[in-house]
Image (tube, rainbow, N blue to C red):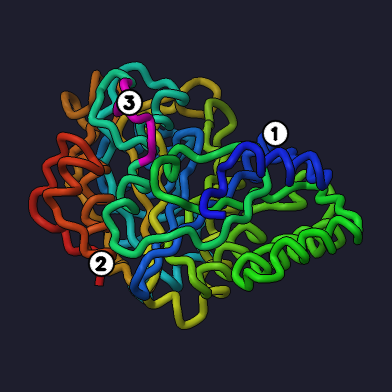
Amino acid sequence: MTRSFDPGRRRFLGTGLALGCSAAASPLLTPVTFAAVPGENRLVVILLRGAMDSLDVVQPYGDKAFAAMRPTLKFGEAGGATDLDGFYSLHPALKPLMPLWQAGELGFVHAVSTPYRDRRSHFDGQDLLENGSASADGTLTPARDGWLNRALTMMPGADVRTAFAVGQEDMMLLDGKAPVSAWSPDAELDMSPQAHDLLDMIYAKDPAMQAASDAAFKLANEESGAMEGENRLGPVPLARYTAEQLSRESRIAAFSLGGWDTHRAQHQSLPRALSNLSDAILALKAGLGDTWGRTTVVCVTEFGRTARENGSRGTDHGTGGAMILAGGAVKGGKVYGAWPGLGEGDLFEDRDLQPTDDMRRWLGWTLRDMFDLAPSDIEARIFPELQMGKNPRFLA
C-alpha cells in the first residue's frame, strides 16, 4: 500500500474495525500527517487555525502607538511579559519557551502574511495558506493541492513513511500527488482484541507500519486511561506521537491547533491557545532528543488581527501577522522582519498591521535550506509568483 488516503481503505479502518472518528469536532483533535524524505533534517509545520493575534503574542511595546491601541491587551513586566530585545516583549503564556529563546532555539518573524487581502475569511485564508497560492482574492492553484505536497514531489527519494491512516479529515497542506501517511487521533479508539489481532496480521510483513500502528493505539489507550474530558487527546500527545515518528523514518510532519479566533475576552482565550502551543513545542523537543538539533518547527496562521482592540476586549480579523520558529536548526533569539509601525498612515486600510513580507518567502527558504530545493522550482512550482529575494538566513 502506498497511498494512505485511499477511500476504500479508510472505510475499512473507519467502519470495519469500528474506529469512529470525532477529531473533526475539536480543534485539538486534528490529523497529524507525515512524510519520509532523504537526509537527517526534520520539519514540523503547525497550522494555528483561527488567526493568531501577533501583536499580543510578540508585543511591540517599543512602538509609541501600541499602548493607545491596546489599552487592556498589553502587558508590562508587572503583567508577566518578558522583554525580548528592548522593542518586543513576549506574552506571559509563552514564558515556558524562554529557555529556548535564550538558547537560540526560538524566534519570530513579524509583519508577514500570505498574499490574501481584504476579505478576511477563515476558510479562504486557511485554504490559501495550505495551498500556497499567490491569489489576493481566495483563488487556489488549479490542482487545489498543498504546497508541502508539491515540495515532496521535488525531493528525490521521498516516499510514504507508512500507509497507516485513521480519521476522516485530510490536510490540504499535504494533499496532492506525493504519497504521504496520515494518522488522526480519536477520542475513543474502541478496538476489540480480535480487531487488533487482525491489524497485526495485516502489518505482519511491514515493520514500519506495525510500529506506527502500535504507537497510535498505545497513545490512545494511555490518554483515554489517564485523562478525562475535552482535552483527552490534546497538543501534548499529538506532539509526542509526532516526535516518536520523526525519530524514526519520518522527516516531515504537519498538524494544526485551534483556538486562535479571539473576537472577545482575548485575555482569557489566547493564553489557553498559547499554553497549548508552548506545551506542544516543548513536547516535541523532549521527544526528539538529539534529533531536535536538526529540527525546524514553523508555526503559521492564516492572517493576523486588527491593530486596535475592539469593545469586547478582543480583536477582529486582520492582515499582517507573525510566524513562530523553533528548533535546534533555527537561529533564534531574534525577531525577524521589517517593522512597519503602528502610527498614523502606517496601518493597512487604517485597521491592520501592514505586512512587509510574504510569509511564503520564509517558507520557501525553509525548504531551500533544509532540503536543498532549487529556488527556481520553489518560485515556479511550490509557491507560484513568489520572489524569494535574499536569503534571510534564519536556519543554521
Q: Nearer the viewer, mark 2 or mark 3?
A: 3
**Residue 284 forms part of the magenta stretch:** no
Residue at image point 48% right, 35% down: 72
Locate the N terminus by quadrant.
Answer: bottom right
Amino acid on which disc 3 is placed: Leu
Question: In this figure, which residue is indicated by the disc labeled 3?
Answer: 140
Q: Does the residue at mark 2 contact the one at mark 3 (Cβ under 8 Å)?
A: no
Mark 2 surroundings within 10 Å by alpha-carbon count, few (fewer than 14), some (14 through 19), many (20 or more): some
Q: Where is residue 188 in the image (x, y as percent from the top left)?
A: 82, 48
Q: To which quarter of the image does residue 42 belong?
A: bottom left
Question: In this figure, which residue is indicated by the disc labeled 2?
Answer: 395
Residue at image point 16% right, 43% down: 379
Q: Position of residue 391 (x, y in %)?
A: 13, 58
Question: In this figure, which residue is indicated by the disc labeled 1?
Answer: 25
Label 2, label 3: how far apart the Cα atoms are:
29 Å
N-terminal label among 2 and 3: 3
Q: To which quarter of the image does residue 374 belong?
A: bottom left
Q: What stretch is highlighted in magenta?
A: 139-146
Label 3, label 1: how far apart the Cα atoms are:
26 Å
Locate the C terminus by quadrant.
Answer: bottom left
